[in-house]
Image (tube, coloured by chain):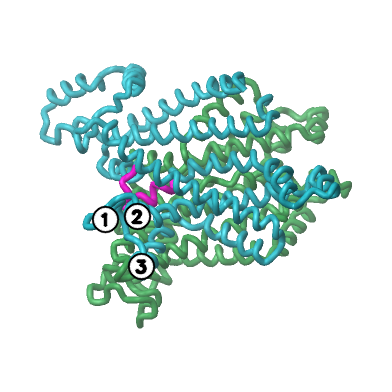
Amino acid sequence: MRGFLVRRLAALVPVLVGVSIVIFLLMHLAPGDVTTVLLGPQATEADRVALRRTLGLDRPVPVQYARWVARVAEGDLGTSIATSRPVATLILPRFLNTALLTATSLALAVMIGYGAGLLAALRHRSVLDRVLTGFTLLLGSTPPFWLGLVLVLFFALRLHWLPVSGMTDMAGEGGALDVARHLVLPTVTTALGPAAIITRLVRSSVLEAMGRPHVRVARAKGLGRGALLWRHVILNALPPIMTITGLQLGYLLGGALFSEVVFAWPGLGSLLYDSITARDTPVVQAATLLIALLFVMVNILVDLVNAALDPRLKES
Amino acid sequence: MQPDTAHAGTRSENRFRAESGAPALTAASRRGWRIAAFARDRAAFAAALFLLLIAGLALLAPFISPYDPAAADNLLRYAPPGTAGHLLGTDAQGRDMLSRLFWGGRVSLTVGVVPVMLASAVGLLLGLLAGTAGGWTDQVIMRTLDVLFAFPMVLLAIAIAGVLRPGLWTEIIAIAVVLIPYVGRLARTATLSVASMPFIEAARAAGATRTALLLRYVTPGVLPPLLVYATTLIGLMIVVGSGLSFLGLGVQPPASDWGAMVSEGRVVLRRAPHATVLPGLVIVVVSLAFSFLGDGLRDALDPRSRRR
């Protein structure tokens, strides 16, 4: 296991270098002069040259890249152009809010996806199976932001069951219950798309596992339905399901961005959106880097869990 | 919005026939067989007709739109669907929804189709190159694509579109770039699978040059799975593109597309829900039609992959 871990982590290094180069170049390619943004259009050419030198923008691009990486490695993510605050202090609270939304969404997506997928597989070719499969197709084609707005329309504006947006009620007493009420619609909005994909995959993996010879043998030997399902079907179907569930986390981070914008949830996604609108490059850079890092780490974690579940994977 | 790679891999029908012992088909009868198989799949056939209709309406927007899509009528704002003269009502500025949906379709369909075509072309080239050259070329290409895989797809598209100036081409380029790794990986897998087949060896033994092998024998085998994948991707990219437009990173007013219409309608959600609901419904139905079409194409090109 340790060798596998070391190999996986070693393979990570070139990916992380690549990711940092992509993000650095992306921001470098952004049109518009940063000195104009910082100093305003009235600044003299001498001021601009001086500022470029202070920011290190007069150095060759590889040097700028190396300096940026060194600063990021020390935890210095730069200063926000729009708010003049250190990017790290802006990002941390936002990150925690996004982590909350992503965690609840992943939990909901997994509950719906595993439950519905198992149900569809066990009732293969029934009406229920068809209805569930139909729903997964429909949800796969539904833009998350639109789904969120439709949910707001019904559950907030028409039925008044849940708040329209935000994370807490300004007038209310606040507390965990208040946050939970505000969390419901963004969570459902973020979770339904991934839930559909997980459902489809659980259904097909379980169907495939049920058709294997050892399952037939176990059934012939008179193993009870529950034990058969758990020991021989579900455990065997888990690795591909885990992989897709891990991938969904990336999808969730994308979907969460739309939920955050629609519901004004103060997370990384809405920060990214505001920063893009404000052309606040350092914040965009840091938020993108953080989300990509998270995504890569989750994928490694999924690999490790899978290797623990299926020792054959360690060999490849 | 993550492309469904589980559905991506298919094998060509010739291999199916070779393995089942059936005689090889002539080009004409093979084509007829595929079209017949496709037409048998009623959902896919209906989806194809529906998409043709939508594309026709979008194409003919200048001639069939009842109103100028940008013309505001201050006396008739928030009109619900069914209002006399405005079949689908008007938006917050009194603009005719039906006309805006026709015109918006031109942009939304472009954003769905063009990036997928661009990414397919580049991805096919990279996949063929990586799959046939092997060695260092393969490593460099695939590791570079791995880097792009390290980003959640929507996030990367937003980041690219966000640093460039918003507009139609920004949206197209952003989506095309994030799709290249997905298409490239599929094209490489398909290339490796086709290149290992006996008929390739036979062609090589018969003296076919490298270029001829690649163009006449390998590429035709790689195209069918790529076509199926691209069709499914178009539906997904209409959703992704509408998301970029919703965030204001796509076409700018007065031009509009379905995603931007949802965004504009959002402000008056309580007063005029149809301004948000209708364009979103159109996105859902069109995207769904593309995925039905993709499924039908897969079944027609690869009978063994029929859904269970």
Judging by colour alone, the chain drawn in cyan in this rendered image is A
In the picture of the structure, the residue carrying the numbered disc 2 is A182
What range is drawn magenta here? Answer: A254-267
> Residue B138 at x, y = what percent?
61, 25
The secondary structure making up most of the magenta span is helix
Residue pictured at 80% horizontal, 30% vertical: B201
Amino acid type at circle 3 is: Ala
Left or right: where does residue A272 sit relative to residue B8?
A: left
Amino acid type at circle 2 is: His
Q: Chain B: what color?
A: green
Q: Are marks 1 and 2 on the same chain?
A: yes
- Element class at badge 2: helix
In the picture of the structure, the residue carrying the numbered disc 1 is A169
Tell me if label 1 and label 2 are in contact, CB under 8 Å.
Answer: yes
The residue lying toward the viewer, choosing from B213 and A231, is A231
Who comes first in sequence, dot 1 or dot 2?
A: 1
Left or right: where does residue A85 sit relative to residue A147?
A: left
Amino acid type at circle 1 is: Asp
- Whole-angstrom CA distance, mark 1 to mark 2, is 8 Å
